[in-house]
Image (spheres, helix red, strand yellow):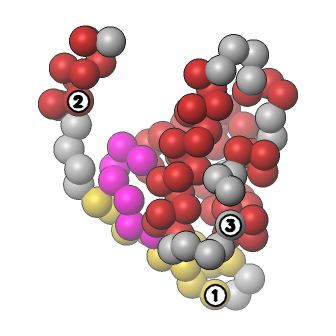
């Protein structure tokens, strides 16, 4: 745990903005580089594209801004991953925050 906490000092909170076209509309998200990397890792594990992940997030939870939704999704996903034997039972749509 201490090694992980010490590693936090090496992280930057540089924000990066990306645009996604969903249902003919442009949706923008601005999250940290670390969050984008986490989302890309999730996509690799789930065998979906980042575009598909964004579409699912928007369709299932669009009451907050896309940036907040993506942050919460990544957090919820990795929290679920900490539970024993949990990820193989869940699909991406099941991991969306309430």
- Other residues around mark 1 within 10 Å, as few (<14) / some (14–19) / many (≥20): few
Drawn side of residue 48 relative to residue 63, left or right: right
- Other residues around mark 3 within 10 Å, as few (<14) / some (14–19) / many (≥20): some
Mark in the foreground, 1 or 3 = 3
Mark in the foreground, 1 or 2 = 2
Q: Looking at the image, which residue is at 38% across and 59% down? A: 31
| Secondary structure category for the residue under label 3 | loop
Q: Which residues are magenta?
A: 29-35
Tag 2–tag 3 contact (CB < 8 Å): no
- Residue 50 place in picture, x, y as percent: 61, 54
Q: Looking at the image, which residue is at 71% across and 45% down? A: 95
Q: Label 2 belongs to which residue?
A: 8
Quadrant containing the N terminus in the rendered view: top left
Name the image quarter holding residue 41: top right
Residue 25: mark in rendering = 1
- All told, the count of numbered labels is 3
Q: Label 3 belongs to which residue?
A: 61
């Amino acid at each position: 745990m201490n090694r992980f906490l010490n590693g936090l000092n090496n992280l930057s909170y540089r924000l990066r903005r990306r645009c996604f076209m969903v249902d003919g509309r442009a949706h923008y998200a601005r999250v940290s580089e670390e969050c984008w990397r986490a989302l890309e890792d999730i996509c690799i594990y789930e065998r979906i594209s980042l575009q598909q992940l964004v579409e699912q997030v928007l369709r299932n939870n669009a009451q907050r801004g896309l940036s907040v939704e993506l942050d919460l999704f990544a957090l919820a996903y990795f929290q679920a991953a900490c539970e024993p034997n949990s990820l193989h039972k869940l699909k991406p749509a099941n991991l969306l925050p309430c």
